[in-house]
Image (cartoon, helix red, strand yellow):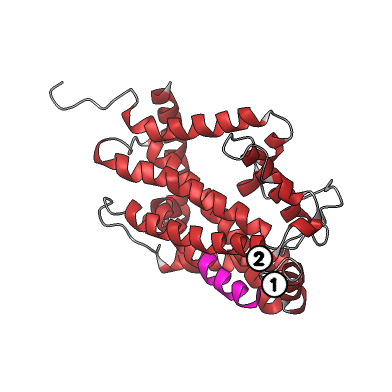
């Protein structure tokens, strides 16, 4: 089954790469630099995030207003930076998944490559959690939905046993200390991800942190165009735990798991996440294994 899936994915990648080679040439084929593209998108996320953080107020009463001020009154800078931050994050998730699928398709995950594969699995989860945490900071109705959903899911664990969600029964229960914790997590997780990215490439020969300059310029231009055409905006006004959130626009790159919280028992969402993660981590040692010369 795994071998057949690899053959199918390899066939697809070879066809797409052939099209890209004709369009961009072998040296500028983005699929040949997909790992470096992920690194570059991280720099865009980090740079735009630093700008946003300089104007962001880390308090329950001030967070929403400060983000709206950045987005509306400073649309030419803060608004664009917010959108670049969002779209570069989405792009990083997409390129990391393509990077993983490509290595799986070409069976580049066994032998000494297991180290890069396993650290890559952990890295994807770090970026994923950091992105969800980032959506909580604007403190709009989407943030409210994500905070409640996340803590209800965590509360299923015997370690918490329902203690977390009690902090969100009333609006007054959420204080600035909690919000500072969210902000600290959003700084700490990307720094941890950056460290793991450096560890991830230690066994990769001739790895480049950045793709060729034309690809970097094309990506930056794409982010700026998206920021102007469809700017990232807050949803539904400021968070209010006295009002139930009913309608939202989802970023499916980061939030695809959340609808399952309300359509499946929380236990089965945990089972899904644990099983998929364990399967990915174990893949370098699963059959079929590569045959050695002479065998």
Query: To which residue does mark 1 refer?
Result: 79
Tag 1 secondary structure: helix
Q: Looking at the picture, does residue 247 appear above or below residue 266?
A: below
Q: Residue at x 48, y 43 (%)?
A: 16
> Magenta span covers which residues?
45-57
Q: Position of residue 264 (x, y in %)?
A: 69, 29
Q: Residue at x 35, y 26 (%)?
A: 286
Q: Position of residue 185 (x, y in %)?
A: 55, 59
Q: Position of residue 24 (x, y in %)?
A: 45, 57
Q: Position of residue 90 (x, y in %)?
A: 59, 54
Tell whether 105 sits left or right of 67.
left
Image disc number at residue 83: 2
Tag 2 secondary structure: helix
Image disc number at residue 115: none
Contact (CB < 8 A) between labels 1 and 2?
yes
Q: Looking at the picture, does residue 158 appear above or below residue 39?
A: above
Q: Looking at the picture, does residue 107 appear above or below residue 253?
A: above
Residue 116 or residue 23, whichever sits in front: 116
The C terminus sits in image quarter: top left
Residue 51 inside the magenta-drawn segment: yes
Q: Residue at x 65, y 60 (%)?
A: 178
Q: Residue at x 72, y 70 (%)?
A: 67
**Among all residues in the image, which is located at the extreme left?**
294
Residue count near mark 1 (Cα–Cα under 10 Å), binned few <14, some 14–19, many ≥20: many
Residue 18 visible, this orientation: no
The N terminus sits in image quarter: top left
Tell whether 33 sits left or right of 69.
left
Image quarter for residue 191? bottom left
Residue count near mark 2 (Cα–Cα under 10 Å), binned few <14, some 14–19, many ≥20: many
């Amino acid at each position: 089954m795994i071998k057949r899936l690899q053959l199918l994915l390899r066939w697809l990648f070879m066809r797409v790469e052939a099209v890209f080679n004709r369009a961009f040439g072998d040296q500028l084929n983005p699929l040949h630099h997909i790992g470096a593209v992920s690194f570059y998108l991280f720099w865009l996320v980090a740079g735009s995030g630093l700008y946003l953080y300089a104007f962001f107020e880390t308090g329950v009463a001030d967070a929403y207003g400060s983000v709206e001020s950045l987005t509306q009154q400073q649309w030419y800078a803060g608004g664009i930076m917010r959108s670049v931050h969002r779209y570069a994050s989405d792009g990083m998730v997409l390129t990391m998944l393509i990077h993983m699928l490509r290595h799986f398709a070409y069976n580049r995950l066994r032998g000494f490559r297991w180290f890069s594969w396993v650290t890559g699995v952990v890295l994807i989860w770090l970026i994923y959690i950091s992105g969800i945490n980032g959506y909580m900071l604007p403190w709009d109705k989407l943030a409210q939905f994500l905070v409640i959903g996340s803590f209800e899911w965590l509360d299923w664990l015997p370690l918490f046993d329902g203690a977390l969600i009690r902090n969100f029964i009333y609006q007054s229960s959420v204080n600035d200390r909690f919000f500072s914790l969210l902000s600290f997590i959003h700084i700490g997780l990307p720094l941890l991800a950056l460290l793991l990215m450096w560890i991830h490439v230690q066994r990769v020969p001739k790895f480049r942190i950045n793709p060729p300059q034309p690809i970097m310029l094309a990506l930056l231009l794409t982010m700026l165009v998206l920021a102007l055409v469809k700017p990232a905006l807050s949803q539904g006004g400021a968070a209010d735990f006295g009002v139930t959130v009913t309608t939202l626009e989802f970023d499916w790159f980061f939030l695809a798991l959340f609808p399952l919280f309300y359509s499946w028992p929380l236990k089965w969402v945990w089972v899904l996440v644990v099983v998929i993660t364990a399967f990915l981590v174990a893949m370098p040692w699963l059959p079929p294994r590569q045959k050695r010369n002479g065998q």
